[in-house]
Amino acid sequence: MSTDRVVLVTGGNRGIGRAIAERFVALGYRVAVTARSGEGPEGTLTVRADVTDAAAVDTAFSQVEAELGPVGIVVANAGITKDTLLLRMSEEDFDSVIATNLGGAFRVVKRASKGMLKARWGRVILISSVVGLYGSAGQINYAASKSGLVGFARSLTRELGARGITANVVAPGFIETDMTSDLPADLQADYKRNIPAGRFATTDEVAGVVAWMASDDAAYISGAVIPVDGGLGMGH
Ligand code: NDP
């Protein structure tokens, strides 16, 4: 497996993004992470960027290119939730989630595509969620942003598929991170009852799939949605 590539993971200071960055480091890739706060794991280059800010994303990429080389693998992972029912959801609740989860992927992938086109090689991996296709009461903004990533990856596949670039979506179910530890215990137990695997996943279980999607073995997979959800969203 060729690991002579530069990887950039957004939101690599904690949670799933951090585990993905750790996995790529362990496999021998050159790895950069964007973080608004904190640092990426050992062995990574941390650059500051808020993914809602195109200029900050551009600066971060320039820094990574100068220090590690052109980015061949981009993992758009940074994401937020602002959950509430539709009638209570403010414009700001909706817009900020779309701007971060969907707009952030747009800014990061657009910037990454320049180098990928030049190299005629690239891997775009978008971290979506089971709820993007399954739906979730109280998460209209989040689910819309996450299903938007599917249309994004499929359109990108049609635009750039002939240039050695693949674009795929990884759709985690419930993963043990800050995002899920905020859920009330009774809700967590309720979710677990509906997951065929009967448990939440570890961040490492997502990281392994992302690393495989970036590998040479996945060269002929593009526009796919790969669930990592213990069977929760079967059929999507
Ligand atoms: P966390 O809340 O643990 O971490 C979110 C990460 O995104 C942090 O690094 C955070 O940075 C970063 N981030 C948020 N907003 C921005 C922004 N505007 N600019 C740059 N970075 C930003 O989340 P998870 O690790 O749980 O989730 C990671 C991804 O996986 C998300 O896209 C999420 O939607 C998705 N996911 C998570 C699931 C889960 O069960 N946990 C299930 C399905 C999908 P900072 O620390 O600076 O805030």
Image (tube, rainbow, N blue to C red):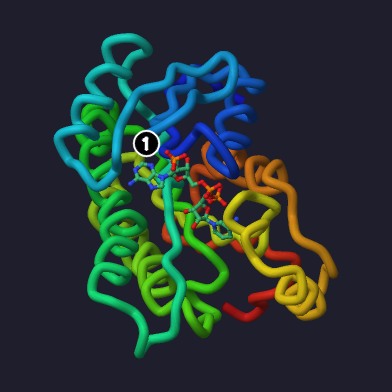
Quadrant in the rendering for residue 114: top left
92 left or right of 73?
left
Going 61% across and 25% down the picture, which residue do you hit?
1
Check the image and report above or below for 50 versus 188: above
Residue type (three-letter) at the residue carrying disc 1 = Gly
Q: Residue at x 38, y 29 (%)?
A: 72
Q: In which quarter of the image is residue 111?
A: top left
Query: Residue 140, percent across and down?
Result: 40, 79
Work out which residue is located at the far top of the displayed protein and give it.
67
Are there few (<14), some (14-19), or many (20+) residues within 10 Å of tag 1? many
Instruction: Determine whether 174 is above or below 204 in the image.
Output: below
Q: Looking at the image, which residue sits at the far bottom?
A: 87
Quarter of the rendering occupied by the C terminus = bottom right
Taking the image as shown, residue 43 lies to the left or right of residue 53, namely: right
For the image, the number of numbered tags is: 1
Q: Where is residue 153 in the image (x, y as percent from the top left)?
A: 36, 58
Q: Position of residue 201 (x, y in %)?
A: 74, 55
> Taking 38 as reference, is 148 above or below it?
below
Q: Position of residue 209 (x, y in %)?
A: 64, 46
Asked which secondary structure carries label 1, the reply is: strand
Residue at the limit of the structure toward the left, as seen here: 55
Left or right? Give the position of 176 relative to 135.
Answer: right
Image-based side of 54 in relation to 136, left or right:
left
Front residue of 37 and 48: 37
Q: Which residue is drawn at 44% across and 85% down?
A: 85
The residue beneath circle 1 is 122
